[in-house]
Amino acid sequence: LTETSLQAQILIPLVASLVFGLLTASLIVLFALPAIYAILDDLGLSTLARERMVLEGENRVAPV
């Protein structure tokens, strides 16, 4: 990051955006995606919740 050559001036912003993009994507996958799945399961909108309802005899959700 302290390099001053012409190639480094082009590559430093590219590498910085790549690193922050990877960090953001990793955080989304590790935290947001499981939270979304948990919310969908609580609302009964996931396939696992549908299977659970069918096994328990609560066929309130139409099969897809």
Image: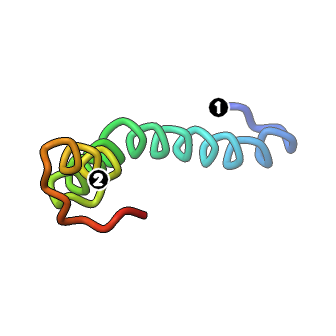
Q: What residue is disc 1 on?
A: 2
The answer to which of 45 and 38 lies nearer the viewer is 45
Give percent across and percent down for residue 1.
63, 33
Q: Are marks 2 and 1 in contact (CB under 8 Å)?
A: no
Secondary structure of the residue carrying tag 1 is: loop
Mark 2 is on which residue type?
A: Ile
Question: Does 59 sit left or right of 17 as displayed?
Answer: left
Which class describes the residues within 10 Å of circle 2: few (<14), some (14-19), or many (20+)? few
Q: Residue at x 35, y 50 (%)?
A: 47
**Which quarter of the figure has residue 27?**
top left
Q: Residue at x 46, y 37 (%)?
A: 26
**Which quarter of the figure has residue 7?**
top right
Mark 1 is on which residue type?
A: Thr
Q: Residue furthest front?
A: 57
Colour convention of the picture = rainbow
- The correct choice, above or below, for 19 with respect to 35 in the image is above
Residue 12, disc: none
Give percent across and percent down for residue 23.
48, 38
**Which quadrant holds the C terminus?**
bottom left
Q: Residue at x 28, y 45 (%)?
A: 51
Secondary structure of the residue carrying tag 2 is: helix
Q: Earlier in the sequence, mark 2 or mark 1?
A: 1
The answer to which of 11 and 42 lies nearer the viewer is 42
Question: Does 15 sit left or right of 43 as displayed?
Answer: right
Q: What residue is disc 2 on?
A: 36
- The correct choice, above or below, for 35 with respect to 45 in the image is above
Question: Does 7 sit left or right of 38 as displayed?
Answer: right
The answer to which of 45 and 9 lies nearer the viewer is 45
Gap in Å between the C-alphas at discs 2 and 1?
40 Å
* Foreground disc of the pair 2, 1: 2
